[in-house]
Image: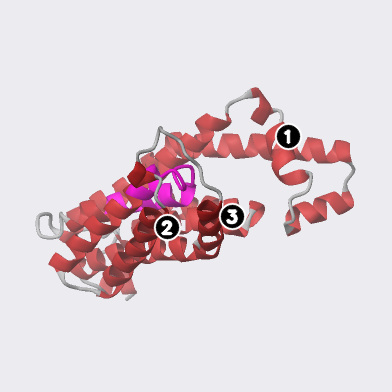
Amino acid sequence: MNFNQLASGQKRVNHAHRLVQIGILISLLWKISFFIYADRVYETISIQDSFFPDLLRSSITLRTCFLGTIFCTVVNVFSTNRSLQKSCNFGQLSGLSLLCLHQGTYNDMTFLTSWWCAVWSWWIGNRFDIDPPEELLKKAAFLARLIVSVIFLGGAVGKWTSEYWSGQVLYDIYFVDRDYWTFNYLRSNYNADQLKWLALCYSRLVIILETLAGFGLWLLKDRVAACLSILLLTLIALSSNLLLFSVTGCLIALSSVGFLTIQPSMGTDQN
């Protein structure tokens, strides 16, 4: 008998919530060295853009939201108190919302993907005592893969341009001088024309996979969707830049919720 059959539905709900919280924490901590550097630059080079109100230009707001979100996430990872979890979910969502709107971090995908995971956490936290565990887990897994599908679709839509389809954008970003083992290897073994052809193939593969995932991932069964999501999200970071795990780490954890669904009548997943 495996762990899925031994664990109760309520424990699985707790595991799902904690799993996503751990994913958010990994994403934020993965980002911390870059955040410290970026914070120093932001403090040194003042940017005055009237589009952002004073609160959303302040470096104090930036630091408070980042550290406050980490604090709420750490508490959530270890706490089993429902009221405290709900409060931390709200604090986490509020902090990430401000980070997504702040002048210094509005364009950072780490905080956007973490925000979606925080939305999911806030939702499930408010359903703990309303839905039966089996039903809640099925809803949670569906919402998780729907969120991941939307994120993939957003990435695909932004790449459906002639510049991306030709491979020129990714060629300039990665293949010319990106210091990463895959691109270092390619530059050492292929000439410029071959690299452009590889960039074209790579770019079109990314566009097609993200499009298919965006339109179809949410339609798949729980565990199939979880496996494919985790594979794609892991490959994105491994093939491009390990720093991208700050973006995909929380989504990998969110996708893993699909492994925790159970069939009400037998205590195992019907998928």
Q: Is residue 106 magenta?
A: yes
Question: Quarter of the image holding residue 61?
Answer: bottom left
What amino acid does circle 2 point to?
Cys
What amino acid does circle 3 point to?
Ala
Can residue 242 be seen in the rendering of this structure?
Answer: yes
Which of the two marks, 2 or 1, is nearer to us in this view?
A: 2
- Quadrant of the image containing the N terminus: bottom left
Does label 3 or label 2 sit earlier along the sequence? 3
Mark number for residue 200?
1
What residue do we see at 23% from left, 63% from top?
88
- What is the x, y in percent for residue 177? 78, 48
Q: Are marks 3 and 2 in contact (CB under 8 Å)?
A: no
- What is the x, y in percent for residue 73? 32, 65
- What is the x, y in percent for residue 222? 35, 51
Mark 3 lies on residue: 237
Can residue 221 be seen in the rendering of this structure?
Answer: no
Left/right placement of residue 71 relative to residue 201 reads left
What residue do we see at 84% from left, 50% from top?
187
| C-alpha gap between disc 3 and disc 2 | 13 Å
* Magenta residues (range): 98-120
Left/right placement of residue 154 relative to residue 98 reads right
What residue do we see at 56% from left, 49% from top?
45
